[in-house]
Image (cartoon, rainbow, N blue to C red):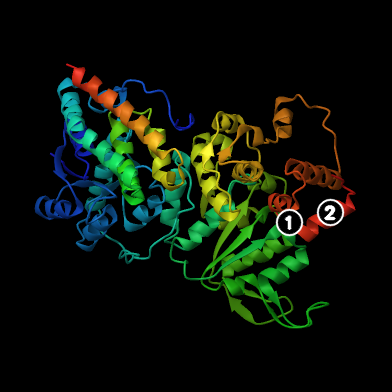
Amino acid sequence: MEKILVIDDDKLVRKVFKLTLSKEGYDVLEAEDGRQGLQVIKAEQPDLVLTDFQMPGINGLEVIAEISRLKLNIPVIMLTGYGDVSLTIKSIQKGAYEFLEKPTKPEVLKSTVRNALDSAKTSRDLPDVISSEDEVEKELDNNFLVGRTPRMKQIFKNIGMISMNKVNVLIEGETGTGKELIARLVHFSGITRDRPLVVVNCSALTETLLESELFGHVKGSFTDSIRDKKGKFELAGDGTIFLDEISEVSLNTQVKLLRVIQELEFEKVGGEETIPMRARIIAATNKNLEDLIKEGKFREDLYYRLKVFTIKLPPLRERKDDIGDLIIHFLHKLNKKFNKNVTKIGDGVVELLMQHNWHGNVRELENTILQAIVMSKNDVLERQNIVLNTALDQQDDGVSPGLELKSLAEVEKAHIKAVLDSVHWNKVDASRILEITRPTLNAKIEKYNLRH
Amino acid sequence: MPSKNFSGSPDLPDLTFLREMLGNDQDSLKEIITIFLEDGPPMIKSLEESVRLRDFDMIKRTSHTLITELSTVGITSVVPDLKRMNKTAKEMNDLDEVMEHIKDVVDRSVQFFKSMD
């Protein structure tokens, strides 16, 4: 009979797990804290350990570390309570087989336990072909992680795995889903965390400038190149280079990027010296690169070189169960940033935000909450201060077929006016919402001849 | 009063989760409820004391445990309040009222469990 050890300082939880798993035919042992758990592990050598994270004395991560140190090859399932999502990456990095949130659905518990036991058996039956990596001891600060939906949890688990390897990563997701945040997480949570992270927005530069940015240039290689300049690949060193909006790179530059990835070396623009490339590449796109390949706008060979591992970030409308936690997260963040004290959520606010389609994703949600916080006159996030952009919803519904096609300047003028009106022309608040400086706001007010 | 978005109606405990977990086994269910009746009320008392003393570390720890505990035995209507307490107790102006509400719901649930045969 397979032996399972459940370590949890909560007697009720321990008993529920014991009764459930006993009915599945397992021999279930119990321990009420990490120290007792380790004693049982050494004495009984269970086939699987389920351990709580937060326990007095030795916590769940330390239990995993000790099992690893003793080279016992026992799979561990980490159990966590509310608000411990940020532990996902740490747990997986430390070697946890899986991460389950309490209370755990019975079918999830049973299948995870079965899979863990089967996986351990497969591992025991096979010989090692390479030595395993040293354990990573570095701690990780993931306080900004928000996401309890299964898809986000899976993404965090994947980050836990890939951050320990320097594989190239492609992050796909709509605008505002947090692609750069994920890139930063991959970089800072793993083996590159003490190395540079260099961010390049590929859409912001012309072809010539982008090449100069990426590879650097030598003095005199083109007009205005008055001195040698290091490129982003060189600056990234052993770290990470994050290529945002990779779809916007021209075909010419794509060829050069491909060569860098294949040959792991490059030359500065106008230079002859070959410079080695050691950085990990994380690329991000809000477009479907496979479609662009079909249209001849993106090289297939480069695509496969970039997507050694792919992270697909879901749009917010497909992870609406995270909205509650995101609201609380943004209240914390924005209260601190803007010295406000909005600590309550008014009637109907959550329901209203849950109904919206969030075409601008998490970024739109943050801006909506920011606007409501700025407009609040007390400590309540009130429904009346929630201003939702429903124009795109109407397009979805097909009820706005005669959408007026406006110039960018017209849209900007109208938006600035709307924001100013919404904050009663408080320019400090307006410039915060618009994320521009006050002089820039003043210049735009003058340019568009806006009046209170 | 606690914010409506953080608390639901104090319904009776919903034992669906536990029944599924325990394969509808009545003896096992009784065993779990007995443990809850022993451990749950002192935990609520501890939370109440922490709230009275504004011991925010202890509020965080105890509410964390209670979220799992109460979710398991189906007292889910106060779980959003506990989550709010767990995250933002320091900033809550209605902390005492929320605590009172949680205690009231748990007390009634305890009576319900005791009345179960």
Q: Is residue B84 left or right of residue A380?
A: left
x and y percent of residue A392 in the render?
72, 34
User: With respect to residue A358, does A426 lie above or below?
Assistant: below
x and y percent of residue A205 in the render?
75, 62
Which residue was labeled with disc 2?
A444
- Tell me which chain the residue with mark 2 is part of: A
* Corner quadrant of residue A203: bottom right
Whether labels 1 and 2 belong to a single chain: the reply is yes
**Do the residues under discs 1 and 2 have CB atoms within 8 angstroms?**
yes
Which residue is located at x 76 percent, y 63 percent? Answer: A207
Per the image, label 1 sits on a secondary structure element best described as loop
The amino acid type, in three-letter code, at marker 1 is: Ile
Count of number-bearing discs:
2
- Tell me which chain the residue with mark 1 is part of: A
Taking the image as drawn, is residue B31 in sight? yes
Which residue was labeled with disc 1?
A436
Taking the image as drawn, is residue A24 in sight? no
User: With respect to residue A273, does A395 lie above or below?
Assistant: above
Which residue is located at x 23 percent, y 33 percent? Answer: B41
Which residue is located at x 67 percent, y 72 percent? Answer: A215
The amino acid type, in three-letter code, at marker 2 is: Lys
Front residue of A263 and A144: A144
Per the image, label 2 sits on a secondary structure element best described as helix
